Amino acid sequence: MIRVGDTYYMSSTTMHMNPGVPIMKSKDLVNWEILSYAYETLGDSDDLILENDKQMYGKGSWASSLRFHDGTYYVSTFSGNTGKTYIFSTNDIENGPWKSIEFRPSMHDHTLFFEGDKIFMIWGAGTMKMVELESDLSGIKPNSEKVLIQNATEPAGSNVGLPAEGAQLFKVNDKYYIFNIAWPRGGMRTVIIHKADNIIGPYEGRVALQDKGVAQGGLIDTPDGNWFAYLFRDNGAVGRIPYLVPVTWENDWPVLGVDEKVPMELDLPASNGLMPGIVVSDDFKRKKGEPDLPLVWQWNHNPVAELWSIDRKKGFLRLKTDRIDHDILQARNMLTQRTFGPESMGTIKLDLSGMKDGDFAGLTLLQKDYGMIGVRVNDGKKELVMSRAEDTVEKEIESISFTGNSILLRAVCDFKERKDEAKFYYSLDKGKNWEQLGDILQMKYTLPHFMGYRFGLFYYATAQPGGHVDFDFFKIDDQIKF
């Protein structure tokens, strides 16, 4: 997160979703909107495009660093499966375009930092290292690597679970501060800060916050001189949720929280909710000049351009198939939006008239233990199916016969107090009455996917390619209501 004048910008992580590294904007640190993405795709290897049984779930691009220097915005990230570090730059963060540079190796949880005419990256896990970059950002200067902190985890104790990582470097009043996160065994996520008078050290470290597992992030100040730490907390199946924690200063150290605790209320402007800046309903009708897809949408893995289209006049998203797939995790062109808490609900309307035998289309809640409701064609007959996965094994829970070419499907998420339950429904009478199909999906946050559940619009062929399905609309709600 950075502040330029009275405007805040934030980058985030979306891993196997494309376009990637969303850039968001706020005027008050509370209400955010997506402005753009740093990239469309990272490349075209088999794991990025879901070919030959390869995939990049939980991989793709990880933690990003956002900076503003001499009129240019920079966002950098890294990818373990491509083995590269990426730096994207633009003079216009709200409209782009973004220039892309990539080089090896992949620098884990790095922070980009400008100091005079030099450009550095600090990164690591346990041991914090620094390199100097070439002036054109094209790579690492030879023989520039230095160890800044040999054991950055040490302030959290010797009972190391997750060693210090997630480095972010800040310069405040000529002091240098490196924020890291560690996770002692049997404990919780912990914020560690190291301070130095010089960028190369020596650094003195201390535990800065150990409450509720709120950790990993950095510093942001307001135009009127208030300071906050922006951090996150694992919150079950909905994923990692952001926190702002007030910061005061004592003896050149940032002091996080109130009496060493994370306050659950802050004196900030009211939230207007996540719609339409972060999630939004979509009827797929487009006016002249509007993009085919609003920025809230992301594809699961790389999209295949020739297999999707928007009928701008009639208002349909059409998905097509050109190959056979055997499960939803290998299905290309799944279009997704975030779920969110404390509860959220997604509804779609499907036109099924273009489906072929063996085709399956519908609405999913995507994670490793996914759940879905959809229409499948078997021997020329349609059936409505609810399935869910447990430990990578998909189980069909309930199916009923169905006739017709139009249906409404719904996925309902209850994240209150980490209940993390989802149910699936259908309507045959234009939404007047809804019937549940199948049972409850117990949603679980798992590391193989490394993100909270997402609503996904899917379509794939299991017998013969060449069919199509039309999505009439996707409606998202922040309350469960029928």
Image (tube, helix red, strand yellow):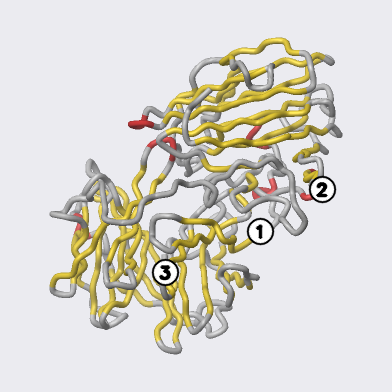
Q: Earlier in the sequence, mark 1 or mark 3?
A: 3
Query: Vertical placement of 380 versus 191: above or below?
Result: above
**Which residue is the site of mark 1?**
40
Q: Residue 306's mark?
A: 2
Q: Position of residue 40 (x, y in %)?
A: 66, 59
Question: Label 1 amino acid?
Answer: Glu
In the image, 418 versus 344, the foreground residue is 344
Residue named by callout 3: 2
Q: Look at 32% across and 50% down and name the residue there.
A: 162
Residue at the image point whose x is 62% and y is 52% from the top? 18
**Secondary structure found at label 3:** strand
- Give left or right: position of 266 versus 304: left
Residue 178 found in image quarter? bottom left
Q: Secondary structure at mark 2?
A: helix
Is 373 on the left-hand or right-hand side of 123?
right
How far, Cα to Cα, is label 3 from label 2?
Answer: 38 Å
